[in-house]
Image: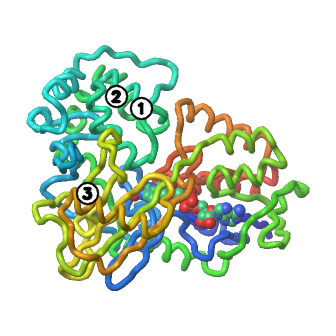
Amino acid sequence: MSRVVVVGAGLSGLSAGLTLVERAPSLEVVVVDAAARAGGAVGTVHERGFAIERGADGFLTEKPAAIELAARLGLADRVIRTRAARDGAYVVRDGALLPLPRGFSMMAPIELGAFLRSPILSPAGRLRAALEVLAPRRCPDDDESLGSFVRRRFGRELLERLAQPLAAGIYGADPDHLSLRATMPRFLHEERRMGSVTLGLRERARRSGADARGVRYGLFASFDRGMQTLIDAAVERLGGRLRLGVAATALTRHGEGVELEVGGERLAADAVVLALPAPAQARLLGPLEPDLGARLFAIPHGSCATVTLGWDAPALDPRLDGYGFVVPKLEGRPSMAATFASKKWAGRAPEGGELVRVFLPGEPSSDDDAVATARAELRALASVTREPVIARVERHVRAMPVYEVGHEARARHISDAARARLPRVRLAGNGLFGVGIPDAIKAGETAALAALAEVKSGRP
Ligand SMILES: Cc1cc2nc3c(=O)[nH]c(=O)nc-3n(C[C@H](O)[C@H](O)[C@H](O)COP(=O)(O)OP(=O)(O)OC[C@H]3O[C@@H](n4cnc5c(N)ncnc54)[C@H](O)[C@@H]3O)c2cc1C
């Protein structure tokens, strides 16, 4: 019987493992993870009636991989949507929370009236952004940074006040370092298609008949008991094929296949899927293919910490009913963003209580410091004075791959070189082709199918 080993049981590895089990019932599938729990960057802790997300709190349904995986696992009726709220989110300006204008999508003011009335930008900044419809179409052949794109199309003020904090909330990185093509290709596409991002998105919103306000949040989904629901179902389906608490420490060629050192034991495999962060892939592949290892190592990763605070009674300023806020870097504050988790999702706090998660950049020096910073931020920005009944700090150290300018070409090169030089080894994870949950799931499926095809054909 052929054996395929999946290394990593984050969502990418779980998806790879499940794909193999579904497509090839006679195959021996082994999924290993160094951690004591599956899920990697995704998981929910339940404490005193609160549901606290360790990492991701939801996923976009625009790309179908996550919602399809949920359906395959019988979770269709456990999927929940964000709660409807009057305002989508807030942006900090001069130490105050201002609502994001209705219809604003990452950089584009789709509803012009609402945007022009919003005081988030100065009148000159609003005018400059509104004139995007007249900005010349550039469409360079080379990749461009997200920052450069927003600056040339919408102006510096919109970049600094809106696009920067919104992008940091997703990618944890500076837009001047982020690749436009690898992070937000649809905006480039609209420039090419319509000569204007705003006109392109407006036209799409009109055609789909969608409420433009829904652009950012309406397509976001999670599960009734938090993201852990998805992990638990995947773990249950994999059953005894999943081995936790065992790290893969070496990879060697072995006849047609490969051999892994896992938890001190040797494990031969006809193919492996490395569903790992890029640096962990580099450590395993580097000794075999130093150039490939170096390229994977060169993908930078950002760190952040989340501080989740819970109250058994309302704590936030009652006038706030959005999903949270983002903080422009030029405000000079210690936080990047906050999610009002119990306003965003049902079932995250006990009846009458509230749950809020604050994002801090980098690595805090101690949990106490992180909690104190988060509380001070909520006091200053959202009038929270009440003592929380729970406080939990999660550190995400070098957990967020930064897709720098030129990333797409580099990722393609790595993937092609791995395929050519390391047959029977397939790369998944979030290092190459997308940082969102649907991307990670899709990467796992694609790698699993490629590994399976090789094993079935008996050829590399
Ligand atoms: C704070 C935060 C918030 C986020 N929020 C969202 C969100 O709201 N929506 C969204 O779509 N995305 C979000 N993301 C991104 C998304 O969660 C991740 O991109 C995705 O979960 C990555 O899955 P993965 O399987 O590729 O990697 P991981 O989840 O990192 O899994 C990799 C696994 O590999 C294991 N491993 C590492 N080395 C070894 C080894 N040598 N041997 C065996 N196992 C090993 C690790 O233990 C880990 O379990 C967020 C990320 C972070 C950090």
Q: Earlier in the sequence, mark 3 or mark 1?
A: 1
Work out whether 392 lies above or below 67: below
What label does residue 150 carry, if any? 2
Along the viewing direction, whichever of 254 and 98 lies nearer the viewer:
98
Per the model, the C-alpha gap separating discs 3 and 1 is: 23 Å
Please name the residue shown 47% across and 36% down the image: 178
Residue 254: x, y in percent? 89, 57
Along the viewing direction, whichever of 63 and 382 lies nearer the viewer:
382
Mark 3 CB in 8 Å range of ligand 1? Answer: no
Pointer 1 residue: 146
Is the C-beta separation of discs 1 and 2 under 8 Å? yes
Colouring used for the render: rainbow
Q: Mark 3: which amino acid? A: Gly
Query: How busy is the neighbourhood of tag 1: few (under 14 within 10 Å), some, or many (20 plus)?
Result: many
Along the viewing direction, whichever of 99 and 336 lies nearer the viewer:
336
Pointer 3 residue: 324
Residue extending furthest bottom?
A: 48
Query: How busy is the neighbourhood of tag 2: few (under 14 within 10 Å), some, or many (20 plus)?
Result: many
Mark 2 CB in 8 Å range of ligand 1? Answer: no
The quarter of the rendering in which ligand 1 is drawn is bottom right
What label does residue 282 carry, if any? none
- Left or right relative to 310: residue 435: right
Work out whether 298 lies above or below 36: above
Per the model, the C-alpha gap separating discs 1 and 2 is: 6 Å
